[in-house]
Amino acid sequence: GENVEQHPSTLSVQEGDSAVIKCTYSDSASNYFPWYKQELGKGPQLIIDIRSNVGEKKDQRIAVTLNKTAKHFSLHITETQPEDSAVYFCAASNGNFGNEKLTFGTGTRLTIIP
Amino acid sequence: NAGVTQTPKFQVLKTGQSMTLQCAQDMNHNSMYWYRQDPGMGLRLIYYSASEGTTDKGEVPNGYNVSRLNKREFSLRLESAAPSQTSVYFCASSGQAQKYFGPGTRLTVT
């Protein structure tokens, strides 16, 4: 089955700086790579996702890049703000859009230092 | 729209007791899921239901049963709780797009 590794497990950055979280996956058939943000006491919330037919996707301060050859994908957050502090999870799957059986990474606790 | 709702929010059980975690969604989604979240292990899929009337095992199904009562509701049952089932449980649903997660149930088995 799929195995997703996520690094680092914790990350602290100064407000306004950029943060990068990296994930690798093992199953070359995986074709969907979402990123979730989980705030304290809440369920994960999708912040951005990418499919294997594109290499990069941006949404305002958030971007995701995918390297299918190396089987890794990364989350980039620019101009970080205190409200970006949360736990971030990457995930991967091979399935129909919306019905994916996601395999999650172990999470990165991001702290933005004011 | 309430989205995905879960009850209860917190529960403490003794070893061997049983309980059912309830989940409902009001987004008319076909697919529903149960995950557990443990420290340092991310979220792991317990069971899922691709449509009303169908259920399938996920990565960690042992010790659990599920019921897809109708399109809205998907319950998770622990027949004989064990300390290893102490965890935070999340229900999720999806249609043709993203997954939506509920707020979670924190379960402690003593």
Image (tube, coloured by chain):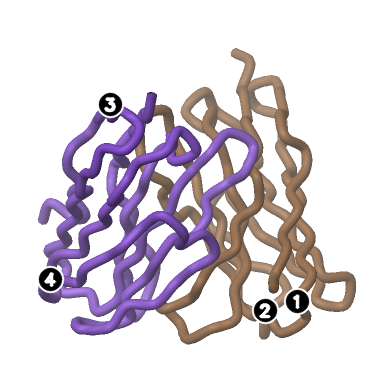
Chain colours: A brown, B purple
Which mark is in front, 3 or 1? Answer: 3
| Gap in angstroms between the C-alphas marked 4 and 2 | 31 Å
The residue labelled by disc 4 is: B69
Q: Nearer the viewer, residue B51 or A83?
A: B51
Circles 4 and 3, Cβ within 8 Å, touching? The answer is no
Most foreground residue, A85 or A102: A102
Q: Quadrant of the C terminus of chain B?
A: top left
| Helix, strand or loop at mark 4 | loop
Check whether the beta carbons of the residues at disc 4 and disc 2 lie within 8 A of each other: no
Q: Are marks 4 and 2 on the same chain?
A: no
- Cα–Cα gap, marks 2 and 1: 6 Å
* Camera-side residue of B109 and B24: B109
The residue that mark 2 highlights is A30
- Please report contact status of discs 2 and 1: CB closer than 8 Å, yes or no: yes
Q: Which residue is mark 3?
A: B12
Q: Within 10 angstroms of label 4, few (less than 14), some, or many (20 or more) residues?
A: few
- For label 3, the crowd category at 10 Å Cα-Cα, with few meaning under 14, some 14 to 19 and many 20 or more, is few
- Residue found at x 74% / y 68%: A66
A99 with respect to A106 (left or right): left
Q: CA distance from mark 4 to mark 1?
A: 34 Å
Spatial CA distance of label 3 from label 2 is 38 Å
Q: Amino acid at mark 4?
A: Leu
* Nearest to viewer (mark 3 / mark 2): 3
Task: Give me the chain letter of mark 3.
Answer: B
Circle 2 sits in a helix, a strand or a loop, which is it?
A: loop
